[in-house]
Image (spheres, grey):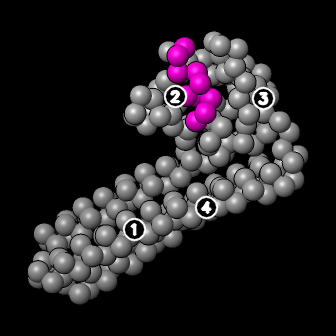
Amino acid sequence: MAADSLIDELLDDARERMVKSAESAQHEFSTVRTGRASPAVLDRVVVDYYGAMTPLNQLSTISAPEARLITVQPYDKSSIKLIEKAINESDVGLNPSNDGNVIRLVVPELTEERRRELVKVVRNLAEEGRVAIRNVRRDTMHQLRELKAEGEASSDDEHRAEVELQKLTDSRVGDLDDVLKAKEKEILEV
């Protein structure tokens, strides 16, 4: 019976890690802009702040006071040029302007070409999520084979666990693909 509990623990751990991988990819999706201003588009921006790569949201207050405007209010006014440079060098595709206190990012209407580029970005993020989920499967398969090799699980137990693990993998990848389709639709919507 010990083999069953070990296998169950491995599968529960794999399920938890796959869910976290899918959630991480979904969070990355929210950082891709869709034509509406959202502070989340700046989540991936990191600033070289006195030699340390620091997430922008730790250096400033980010808000979207209007549908087409994002404001970035640095906690340290002297970092405004560094923040502006980091936004320019990022892949968000927004041009910052500052008045010495606040950085303003006007979110333009998306062109058809830019929408297609953003769809490619989202597809790449989804593929990274799929790879992370498959890596969890690979690691768990390796652990299952080790259990079998050590004699702690039979071939039948290992096979049943592998089938269950594949179902888990397919389910998580399917969920991620559904979110991807919704995000693509949101981006392409005019």
60 or 26: nearer the viewer? 60
Which residue lies under the disc numbered 3? 106
Q: Residue sitting at 34 percent across and 62 percent down? A: 14
Of the two numbered discs 1 and 2 in the rendering, the one whose residue sits closer to the viewer:
2
Q: Residue sitting at 73 percent across and 37 percent down? A: 94
Q: Which mark is residue 135?
A: 1
Q: Is residue 24 visible?
A: yes
Residue 43 picture location, percent across and down: 56, 37
Q: Which mark is residue 184?
A: none
- N-terminal label among 1 and 4: 4
Which residue lies under the disc numbered 4? 124
Q: Would you place residue 108 above or below residue 143 in this image?
A: above
Of the two numbered discs 3 and 1 in the rendering, the one whose residue sits closer to the viewer:
3
173 or 163: nearer the viewer? 173
Q: Quadrant of residue 51?
A: top left
Q: Which mark is residue 57?
A: 2
The answer for how far apart the CA atoms under marks 2 and 4 are is 24 Å
The answer for how far apart the CA atoms under marks 1 and 4 are is 16 Å
Residue range in magenta is 77-86
Side (left or right) of 75 relative to 138: right
Tell me if mark 1 has few (under 14), some (14-19) or many (20+) residues whose alpha carbon lies within 10 angstroms of its own. Answer: some
Side (left or right) of 47 relative to 81: left
Q: Amino acid at mark 3?
A: Val
Q: Residue sitting at 80 percent across and 52 percent down? A: 115
Residue 6 picture location, percent across and down: 19, 66
Of the two numbered discs 4 and 3 in the rendering, the one whose residue sits closer to the viewer:
3
Q: Are marks 3 and 1 in contact (CB under 8 Å)?
A: no
Q: The N terminus appears in which quarter of the rendering?
A: bottom left
Q: What is the secondary structure assignment of the residue under circle 1?
A: helix
